[in-house]
């Protein structure tokens, strides 16, 4: 499910950082497909999962019990493909790429899910760590995957989430290499943004999380570390995809890893201090 062949937006359009969210969504609707790291500076990005209404309570309970990987920013009414986070946006068309799941199996990765949409779907918009990358950059913390024009690497861990109803599964994490002199700033800046995953869940040895090889992410692209870099891991909004795989609901729609929904919300709205 690694889609490394899609290029980051910064490689497609050098002005992507300055796009408005509305412009970004229009580009995605027109067929632009790459990862959204580095797009629309200052605006909050969100993960997406849509499940049938009879699974929605389980999903809401799962998010409530696992707020680090699944911090909820909005939940739609059944059948609605709009959100208060972005006026005029369409959740069926305005992401760069989607994943379609049946009985826990990935069956399609389209750029438009109108043909797959169901009137009983409830959509959850979950905070994304791409949002806090602007805070990291402002604090002088290098963001290696953006520098290298790659999608952020993501890993399925051996750390189980707390089950909820019929849903269970492992936590997924994203990894950003951080030089030692910037580690305290990285922890401080991200801890102030709990709605987009907050502080790291682990710094250092990846084997503690059950990750065997940093060069083989489960999603996204491998990133080159500088000699002194410390691998730092944040809970990731791709966790629902791992939960879908483990729990096998009859149907679900999700974003493709690294290809987020651009909201109209400003990052500072979610900063706690």
Image: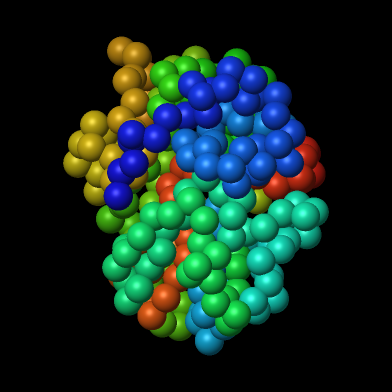
Residue at point 76% right, 45% down? 264
User: In the displayed structure, does residue 210 sit left or right of residue 91?
Assistant: left
Q: Position of residue 181 (x, y in %)?
A: 49, 15
Q: Is residue 113 visible?
A: yes
Q: Does residue 47 appear left or right of residue 153 in this picture?
A: right
Horizontal side, residue 154 vs residue 191: left or right: left
Q: Is residue 52 above or below residue 106?
A: below
Quadrant placement of the C terminus: top right
Q: How is the image coloured?
A: rainbow
Q: Is residue 242 left or right of residue 25?
A: left
Q: Residue at x 33, y 57 (%)?
A: 159
Question: Between residues 166 and 21, which one lies in front from this camera angle?
Answer: 21
- Residue 165, position as x, y percentages in the image: 45, 83
Is residue 136 visible from the viewing direction of this image?
no
Coordinates of residue 55 in the picture (x, y in percent): 50, 81
Image point 42% across, 41% down: which residue? 174
Nearer to me, 261 or 213: 261
Position of 144 relative to 214 (above/below): above
Instruction: In the displayed orientation, state which residue is furthest to the left.
Output: 212
Q: Which image quarter: residue 5?
A: top left
- How many marks the image carries: the answer is 0
| Along the viewing direction, whichever of 87 and 194 lies nearer the viewer | 87
Tell me which residue sits at (71%, 63%) in the image: 82
């Amino acid at each position: 499910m690694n889609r490394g062949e899609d290029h980051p937006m910064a490689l497609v359009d050098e002005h992507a950082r300055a796009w408005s969210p509305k412009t970004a969504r229009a580009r995605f609707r027109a067929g632009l497909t790459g990862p959204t790291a580095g797009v629309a500076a200052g605006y909050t990005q969100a993960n997406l999962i849509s499940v049938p209404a009879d699974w929605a309570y389980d999903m809401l309970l799962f998010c409530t019990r696992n707020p680090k990987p699944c911090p909820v920013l909005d939940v739609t009414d059944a059948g609605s493909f709009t959100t208060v986070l972005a006026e005029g946006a369409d959740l069926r068309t305005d992401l760069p790429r989607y994943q379609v799941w049946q009985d826990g199996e990935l069956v399609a990765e389209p750029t438009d899910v109108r043909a797959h949409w169901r009137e009983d779907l409830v959509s959850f918009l979950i905070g994304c760590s791409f949002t806090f990358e602007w805070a990291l950059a402002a604090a002088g913390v290098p963001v290696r995957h953006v520098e290298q024009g790659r999608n952020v690497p993501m890993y399925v861990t051996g750390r189980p989430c707390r089950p909820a109803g019929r849903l269970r599964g492992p936590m997924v994490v994203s990894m950003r290499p951080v030089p030692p002199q910037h580690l305290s700033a990285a922890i401080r800046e991200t801890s102030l943004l709990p709605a987009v995953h907050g502080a790291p869940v682990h710094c250092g040895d990846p084997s503690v999380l059950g990750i065997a090889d940093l060069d083989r992410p489960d999603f996204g692209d491998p990133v080159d570390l500088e000699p002194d870099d410390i691998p730092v891991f944040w809970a990731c909004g791709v966790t629902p995809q791992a939960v879908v795989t483990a729990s096998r609901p009859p149907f679900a729609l999700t974003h493709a890893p690294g290809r987020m929904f651009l909201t109209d919300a400003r990052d500072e709205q979610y900063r706690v201090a």
